[in-house]
Amino acid sequence: MSKPTLVYRHAEQPGRGLATAGIFLIKALMALPHLIIVGVLQNLAWAVGYVGYWIVAFTGKMPTGIFQLIEISMRWSARSYGWLIGYTDAYPPFEIAPEYPVDVQVTAPENPSKGWAVAGLLFVPKGLAALPHLFVLAFLDVAAVFAVWFGYIATAFTGSFPVGIQDFVAGVLGYNYRLWGWVLGLYDEYPEFTLKATLA
């Protein structure tokens, strides 16, 4: 099993126009079609993930279809937020697995833990275990939103998106995907408290 890993590239020549659109939330409106799809896919992923707990608890295996839907939802989310953040100016295609500068890499679990699956079925045990991460991410996600907004301002005025902001936000995004993957049973090792992402 592998943890979901965010893979991204630094924005080399970000457009000042899109950055200005970001400052005034116009870019968020442009991303709305993708964000709606992401919302639907994420809800589906959580629903089938719960079904997956039952199957893993009894068989020790996660069905390929369930893994694939979770993978699609993560990758679509990464592309959508990657564009909104500003890693690339290329609008995300409406495709399941396109080549894109921002992506999530994850492999299917081979022998997922029946114990963690039962903990997921009961909600409380796995939910309590995830609470410390959710608490940390509540602050990090807010910080990332402000960092992106300041990044828009810097890009609009200088034509350059500060690398430090790019790396920080990628770390927060990657942290979210690792926690999401653990909760849904893609891997069993308890998630690290780290801002880790892979620069392509």
Image (cartoon, rainbow, N blue to C red):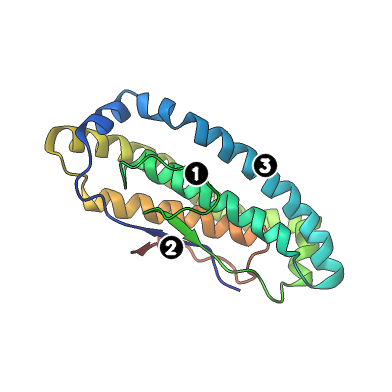
**Which quarter of the figure has residue 1?**
bottom right
Which disc, if any, is residue 2? none
Residue under circle 2? Answer: 194
Assign a secondary structure to mark 3. Answer: helix
Give the distance between the C-alpha atoms of the residues marked 2 and 1, in whole angstroms. Answer: 14 Å
Residue placed under numbered mark 3 in the picture: 43
Residue extending farthest to the right is: 58
**Residues at discs 1 and 3 in contact (Cβ within 8 Å):** no
Q: Nearer the viewer, residue 162 or 67?
A: 67
CB contact under 8 Å: marks 3 and 2? no
Q: Amino acid at mark 3?
A: Asn
Residue at figure coordinates x 31%, y 46% from the top left: 88
- Give x and y (percent) for residue 174: 45, 56
For the question of whether residue 152 can be seen, the reply is yes
Query: Which amino acid, by three-letter code, is at mark 1?
Result: Ala
Question: In the rendered view, does 7 fall on the left or right side of 184?
Answer: left
What residue do we see at 55% from left, 52% from top?
A: 74
82 relative to 13 in the view: left or right = right
Q: Nearer the viewer, mark 3 or mark 2?
A: 3
Label 1 vs 3, first from the N-terminus: 3
Mark 2 surroundings: few (<14), some (14-19) or many (≥20) residues within 10 A: few
* Alpha-carbon span between mark 1 and mark 3: 20 Å
Is disc 2 placed on a helix, strand or loop? Answer: loop
Image quadrant for the C terminus? bottom left
Image x and y of residue 176, in percent: 51, 53
Q: Relative to 65, is 149 above or below?
A: above
Q: Which residue lies under the disc numbered 1?
A: 138
